[in-house]
Image: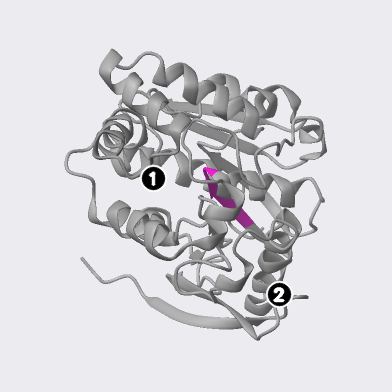
Amino acid sequence: MAAIPVIESEVDFHVEGAGKPCKTWYTIFGILPSPDGVRPLVIMHGGPGVPHDVLRPLQNLWRTHRIPVIMYDQLGCGRSTHLPEKLGDGSFWTVQLFILELDNLLGHLGVQDDYDILGQSWGGCLAAEHAVLHPQGLRRLVLSSSPASKPDLMLASQKLRDQLPSDIQEALIKNEDAGTLDDPQYKQAKMFYFSQHLCRLKPFPDVLMASLKGLIEKTLSWKTRNGPYLFKRTGSTKDWSIKDRVHEISVPTLLLNGYYDPTTDSTMEPFFKGIKNKVERVKFEHSGHFAHLEEPEAYLQVVGDFLIKNGSKVE
């Protein structure tokens, strides 16, 4: 099997108030522009602040559908510029900052007039924020395990927690209430929850471990925007919602989630009901939050076919 062409580089990103030069790291899988006239797919990772590594298997869309795939690490995580001095500054880590970063990358790569986006988890929330602005070049949108509101996601997660064995529930609730997040019982209970709803593969794939490691060790935007808890609403994005604006999304959209996913059907329902263009919906029956890892062949087929079927080739 021939190797997928890969390019890695950086683009300067001027950030008001950063106090230093910033760069966005990105990688391209395949050939851009496509020799087959296939529109590129920009992939937005979640978190906030979980580096792109966990999404690298989606590079295989180049093999299966000849789609050039662009991935990047958002500011504050992974290989892009880190800003530890901005820890806790919710006025800095805004949705608008990351929309500007995306626009900057699209312009740098020269794809701003014709592209698709796949956002995974929080990346899909950002992708939806981008889509409601009616960007001229956006053609197709894939929202993968992405809720339409953080409060709804928290409620869904709490319901899943309350279905766990009683000792796991107790360890999660007791330690989050006490703030004892380093307690071994809490860590063990958290990993049990992850094994049921985040990713059901055992052991976790290396790409997932790489992203989680980057999140735990280096990501300050996560700590600011999410807070340290799994089941408590804290952080600067705790009240984020796009439910009252989903009708502004005007491109064909594909909604994806897993059967065991914390991003339950109810959390994505506003997208399904509110987007006025064609909306398709697929649930992966054996997956949690990372269906592209848990059911990779089916996931690639569904995503690739949606993009190609809906005109990913230049006409």
Frontmost residue, 34 versus 154: 154
Check disc 2 and give the amino acid type: Gly
Residue 60 falls inside the magenta stretch:
no
Image position of 142 (left or right of 63): right
Q: 38 above or below 177?
A: below
Determine which quarter of the picture holds residue 97.
bottom right
User: Which range is magenta?
Assistant: 116-121
User: Mark 2 sits on what residue?
Assistant: 107
The Cα–Cα distance between marks 2 and 1, rounded to whole angstroms, is 27 Å
Image position of 162 (left or right of 225): left
Determine which quarter of the picture holds residue 202.
top left
Check disc 1 and give the amino acid type: Leu
- Look at the image and name its color scheme: one colour
User: Mark 1 sits on what residue?
Assistant: 300
x and y percentages locating residue 276 in the rendered image: 78, 30
Q: Are marks 2 and 1 in contact (CB under 8 Å)?
A: no
Q: Residue furthest front?
A: 178
Determine which quarter of the picture holds residue 284.
top left
